[in-house]
Amino acid sequence: MELIQQLVNGISLGSIYALIALGYTMVYGIVKLINFAHGDVFMVGAFAGFYSISILHLGFFPALIISMAICALFGVLIERIAYKPLRNATRIAALITAIGVSLFIEYGTIYVRGAQPEAYPGNVLPSTELHFGSITINSQSVLILAVSLGLMGILQFVVHKTKIGKAMRAVSYDTEAAKLMGINVDRTISATFAIGSALAGAAGVIFGTYYTKIEPLMGIIPGLKAFVAAVLGGIGIIPGAMAGGLVLGVVEALVSAFGFSLWRDGAAFVILILILIFRPSGLFGKNVREKV
């Protein structure tokens, strides 16, 4: 039954990828920008959660909320300083800026606090074994999955049932028409960055709690994998980002379970190549109308 445990681990990991991928796909759906600094917002969230737990002696959920708030403000700051002036620039200019912002955050963090890694306390979440017949599952995996799915559910509610969510969907369909209807596009874009960054911050705390070790360059690989997840599901499509993250996590877990753990990072990029060759619009396809 080791395979069942690996599947649960894969779904838990995939839910982390999905939380990060949601930020990619929301921003792309609104402003058609691939925000490559998003993985570094995830890193900032992990450190915000770590310091909340280790210095302020807070529990998991207060640290999660603080990290989400810090990352939401950080995301808005990035958008206002780096991306807003380039709103009407070419896409390549915005893309290069995103890469520059990513490097600035990474090495700015190293300059401020050093490059040494940190380790989350091992008792942040209870770790017990849950037995279901002959199947044994770690309680941390279940709790992390529940928190991630809960956050995704809240996002779906915000996007579909709130005023800002309706504004986001309107801007993603037609920015000019949204302006004519009286929607404040700048504020809507800032709200999109805030929500996406908050989810990345939550993913950072969850990642740190589950994998313990965090360091300033930790956002590079998860950020790239989350981008793969967004492309896999269909970039700009919220349900696609969720599904893509979960699929990617399960694939990685299965690759490890079958003894190819050294290939688990490569598997994500093999999937990216295959999806771009055979279905470049993603699993959910172009005909999906539910964009952001």
Image (cartoon, helix red, strand yellow):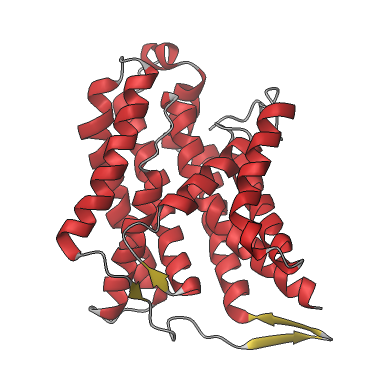
Instruction: Locate residue 260: give its quadrant.
Output: bottom right
* Residue 255, above or below 212: above
Extreme-left residue of the structure: 112
Residue visible at 26% across and 48% down? 105
In the displayed structure image, the side of residue 118 where residue 161 appears, left or right:
right
Residue visible at 52% across and 85% down? 126
Q: Quadrant of the N terminus?
A: bottom right
Q: Nearer the viewer, residue 188 or 93?
A: 93
Q: Tell me where residue 269 appears, x and y as whole percent.
A: 61, 43
Q: Nearer the viewer, residue 249 or 255?
A: 255
Q: Tell me where residue 123 appears, x and y as whole percent.
A: 44, 86
Residue visible at 69% across and 34% down? 275
Q: Is residue 100 visible?
A: yes
Q: Is residue 149 visible?
A: no
Q: Tell me where residue 163 appears, x and y as whole percent.
A: 43, 35
The number of numbered discs placed on residues in the rendered structure image is 0
